[in-house]
């Protein structure tokens, strides 16, 4: 799923299509998520721009609060974009924008049955992640912290537990504020990160997109390279052998 | 014929197919999806599906978000 890039870009929060385009190019992503809205509110231009850049579209169900709404939106997205991919969001309340686990699991099960490739935005609960994997989701996308908060990964231990609990890709979605958060996600073993606000609302979105690109690459390399264990005391890096004596 | 299109009242002088209605709203085809009274209408059937008095139609497309 992530041959070209381990960074999925969200499109919410960008000041203009031009700024979004620059950020997409700088991020190196090949997968961009979009919402579905009424044509009069959405305005033209987004999809032609994504097509021109050659990036894949990952439709999402942003704004849905029930399984029924999310399932319907997913079916409309499949019609619109001719893809089985769906980033499934079923939000619990508008204060936290955290997922409603009960509705999410219900929607995920239905959509898997309808032949979708379901990527659910979920909480950092390892048990719920496993339940989502069990019903056939293609990946799980736990929140590091609430959407748009920029608080980073509030419970790294849970992200690591999720990584160990499921055999499908884990994508850190929501909460990333800056490059080090993205690196940490990758170091914890995530297969990818999904970033929107941290890039689109940065002072210089294209520069932050480039920073995130490098952060993800660095974190992934560090994860696969295998870090040294943390130790309480120092371990000398230089041998005493051959040391001059006086 | 009175319809509700994307939440607004819409007056059509003649009978309309889903395709004819979409053409009044957007030139785009790819990236557009339609639901009539809450049911998805596959694009391949747009020209064959007539709209009826009182139908509630949603015409959706890609927007920044999520």
Image (cartoon, rainbow, N blue to C red):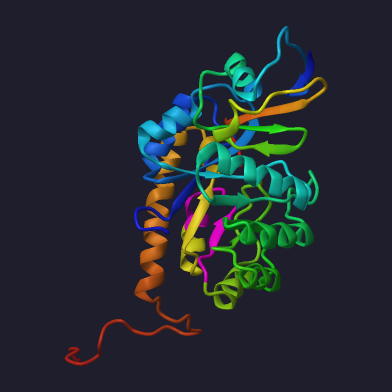
Is A142 included in the stretch rendered in magenta?
no
In this view, B57 is above or below A125: above
Image coords of residue A202 (percent x, y): 52, 36
| Residue sitting farthest toward the top | B13
Magenta residues (range): A168-182
Q: How many numbered badges does the structure rendering display? A: 0
Is A170 included in the stretch rendered in magenta?
yes
Image coords of residue A64 (percent x, y): 73, 44
Q: Residue at x 70, y 74 (%)?
A: A127
| Residue sitting farthest toward the front | B48
User: Where does the C terminus of chain B fall, quadrant-wise?
Assistant: top right
| A120 to the left or right of A21 | right
| Residue sitting farthest toward the right | B54
Choose between A232 and A208: the one closer to the eye: A208
Residue A177 in sight in this render: yes
Q: Residue at x 77, y 49 (%)?
A: A68
Residue A61 in sight in this render: no
| A128 to the left or right of A10 | right
Choose between B39 and A77: the one closer to the eye: B39
Image coords of residue B1 (percent x, y): 78, 13
């Amino acid at each position: 799923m992530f041959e070209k890039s381990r960074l999925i870009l969200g499109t919410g929060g960008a000041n203009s299509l031009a700024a979004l385009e620059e950020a997409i190019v700088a991020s190196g992503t090949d997968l961009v998520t979009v919402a579905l809205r009424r044509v009069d509110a959405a305005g033209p231009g987004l999809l032609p721009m994504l097509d021109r850049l050659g990036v894949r579209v990952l439709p999402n169900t942003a704004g849905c609060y029930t399984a029924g709404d999310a399932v319907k939106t997913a079916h409309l997205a499949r019609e619109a974009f001719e893809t089985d991919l769906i980033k499934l969001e079923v939000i619990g309340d508008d204060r936290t924008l955290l997922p409603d686990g009960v509705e999410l699991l219900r929607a995920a099960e239905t959509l898997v049955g309808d032949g979708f490739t379901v990527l659910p935005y979920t909480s950092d609960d390892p048990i719920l992640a496993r339940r989502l994997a069990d019903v056939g989701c293609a990946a799980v996308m736990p929140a590091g912290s609430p959407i748009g908060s920029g608080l980073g990964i509030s419970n790294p231990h849970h992200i690591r537990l999720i990584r160990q609990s499921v055999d499908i890709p884990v994508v850190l979605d929501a909460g990333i504020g800056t490059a080090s958060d993205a690196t940490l996600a990758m170091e914890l073993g995530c297969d990818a990160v999904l970033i929107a606000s941290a890039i689109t609302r940065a002072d210089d979105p294209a520069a932050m997109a480039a920073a995130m690109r490098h952060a993800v690459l660095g974190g992934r390399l560090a994860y696969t390279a295998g870090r040294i264990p943390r130790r309480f005391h120092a371990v000398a890096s230089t041998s005493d052998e051959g040391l001059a004596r006086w | 014929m009175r319809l509700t299109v994307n939440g607004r009242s819409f007056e059509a002088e003649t009978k309309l197919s889903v395709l004819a209605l979409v053409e009044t709203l957007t030139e785009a085809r790819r990236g557009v999806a339609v639901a009539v009274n809450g049911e998805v209408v596959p694009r391949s059937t747009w020209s064959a599906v007539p709209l009826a008095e009182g139908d509630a139609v949603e015409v959706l497309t890609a927007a920044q978000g999520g």
